[in-house]
Amino acid sequence: MDFQESKTKENLARSFAAECQEGARYQFMAKMAQQQGYQYMSMLIRTLAHNEMAHAQQFFNKIVELGGNQTQNIEITAGYPFKSGELLDVLKQEAENEHMSAESIYPKFADIARDEGFEDVANLFDMVSKVERTHERTLKKLHENLSCNCLYKCNDEHAFKCDECGTIIMNKCAPKTCPLCKMGQGYYRIDFSIN
Ligand SMILES: [Fe+2]
Ligand SMILES: [Fe+2]
């Protein structure tokens, strides 16, 4: 099938727009987390934003590669989320958005691309949807830990690590201030590499 006539061209453009917006929303969210003192969470969310921009770039590159010079403006109709709220709400909404992308939108786009004979694009959609699944898990975990107030405490003794200086402390909770670098609790995270 001719790329210019394909549904896949539109789906790539939709996905590019979605990834750009997701990347932007994650940067807003990371800023919100940072302003509230959740440094480590903020860093994690910034990494997600970075991932979304990498997805956006791959979708953009595919349009250029397959469309070449013939590709002008691509008209699309699509809906994008504009909900906002407190950090907890936003974490939940974004986890739901990731779920939609991973389990429904990208698999559907992959099927269409395969039907239209764009196997490479189908594989790209499959690979990206796998990543979105891990994003969903990260956001859910953050939402869960923040809502039960257990970002910095565990029921059992655990390794807590300061992301600023690397200090590791075995305790049931992270210190209010890091004894080594004096940074706040927001720099601490449970270190799963230790136990
Ligand atoms: Fe993405
Ligand atoms: Fe994502």
Image (cartoon, rainbow, N blue to C red):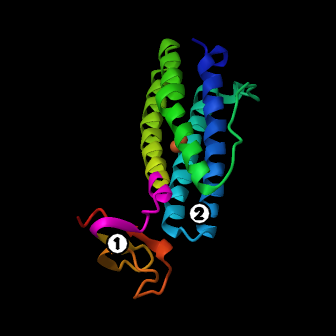
Q: What residue type is labelled 1?
A: Phe
The magenta segment = 144-157
Report the side of 180 relative to 86 (left or right): left
Q: Judge whether 114 appears above or below 157 on screen.
A: above
Q: Judge whether 116 appears above or below 145 on screen.
A: above
Q: Which mark is residue 160?
A: 1
* Residue 110: percent from left, percent from top: 49, 23
Kindly state the secondary structure of the residue where label 2 is placed.
Answer: helix
View extreme (left): residue: 195
* Residue 32: percent from left, percent from top: 64, 62
Q: What residue type is labelled 2?
A: Ala
- 155 inside magenta stretch: yes
Residue at which label 2 appears? 33
Spatial distance from mark 2 to mark 1, Cα to Cα?
19 Å
Q: Is residue 57 among the parts visible in the rendering?
A: no
Q: Is residue 31 among the parts visible in the rendering?
A: yes
